Amino acid sequence: MKKKLRIGFLHSLIRKEEKLLLQEFRSRSNVEIELIDDRSLTFTIGEPAFEVDAVVERSINHSRALHALKLFESSGISCINTYRVASICGDKLLTSDALAAFSIPQPEVRVAFTEESALQAIEEMGYPVILKPAVGSWGRLLSKINDRDSAESVLEHKSILGSYHHSIFYIQKYIEKHGKDIRSFVVGDKCIAAIYRKSDHWITNTARGAVTSNCPVTDELSDISVRAAKAAGGGILAVDLFETDGGYLVNEVNYTMEFKNSISVTGVNIPEHIVNYVLDTAYKAKHEKN
């Protein structure tokens, strides 16, 4: 009798996405799931972690996810997504650098380390620009800077009141997206679906109230989405894009993607694709060990 695969499910809160994934995992007769709550997780450095064939990462907290993935991988456990992918996607500066290394089109980005140099960079880029924390999600703490007065005020606030991450100024040229952007979903080497996110606000994250609708996956959209995912290290990723007259621009790449609002509008069973990829990766890893 074929031995079951043991999959570690690293999580924080069990949200709708996690419920859908667990339901899909539990529908497979050849899989055992071990829930691993990052709020109670401990490691002993240098000793084996868990008796699982692979770990699928679904943590909400980036720092917990990042360090847990590193320690799981140090114990010889395959992780989806990997520590490297989490490192790149969890830091907008590293994401932009990775996209540039693979010649993926993206908005102009400049990085500065002081108020003075950040202001100079903004003035050279021209208004408006978007100031983002290098580490952050759900469209939080973004600032659209329309003029010098706003720039000076926001830069001062970030410098004095912000954490370490806010002392690194990540400045992105504002792209007029006419109230919508695109999120595409990449699993392995395939773009399985995409959605439009529409809002009257310039921030079009669904966490901020954007409305979703289906976006046809054209060859052009699929190509840039898969290339962006590969630039970030590959795996299970959501790619945020702007659609411009000159073509697509990649805005961000997300490694713990949310998809609950995208299944019904696209008609694609996203959890099924994710679980298939995780199990294929786990089987390969187990075979290589044996």
Image (cartoon, rainbow, N blue to C red):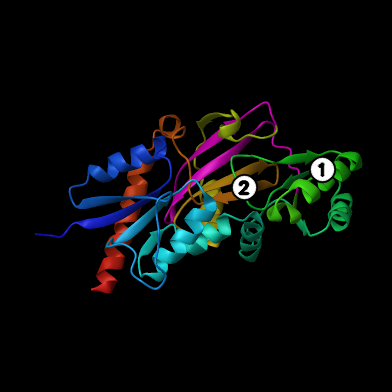
Q: Is 245 located above or below residue 226 in the figure?
A: above
Q: Position of residue 183 (x, y in %)?
A: 54, 41
| Res 51 visible | yes
What span is in magenta? 172-201
Category of crowding for the residue at label 1, using alpha-carbon neighbours closer than 10 angstroms: few (below 14), some (14–19), many (at least 20): some
**Residue at label 1?**
154
Name the residue rendered at 40%, 47% in the picture. Answer: 11
**Residue at label 2?**
136
Element on which disc 1 rests? helix
Q: Position of residue 170 (x, y in %)?
A: 73, 53
Name the residue rendered at 53%, 30% in the picture. Answer: 212
Q: Is 140 located above or below residue 101 in the figure?
A: above
Q: CA–CA distance between discs 2 and 1?
A: 17 Å
232 and 17: which is toward the camera: 17
Which quadrant would residue 20 be assigned to in this image? Answer: top left
Q: Position of residue 178 (x, y in %)?
A: 70, 32
Name the residue rendered at 67%, 58% in the picture. Answer: 93
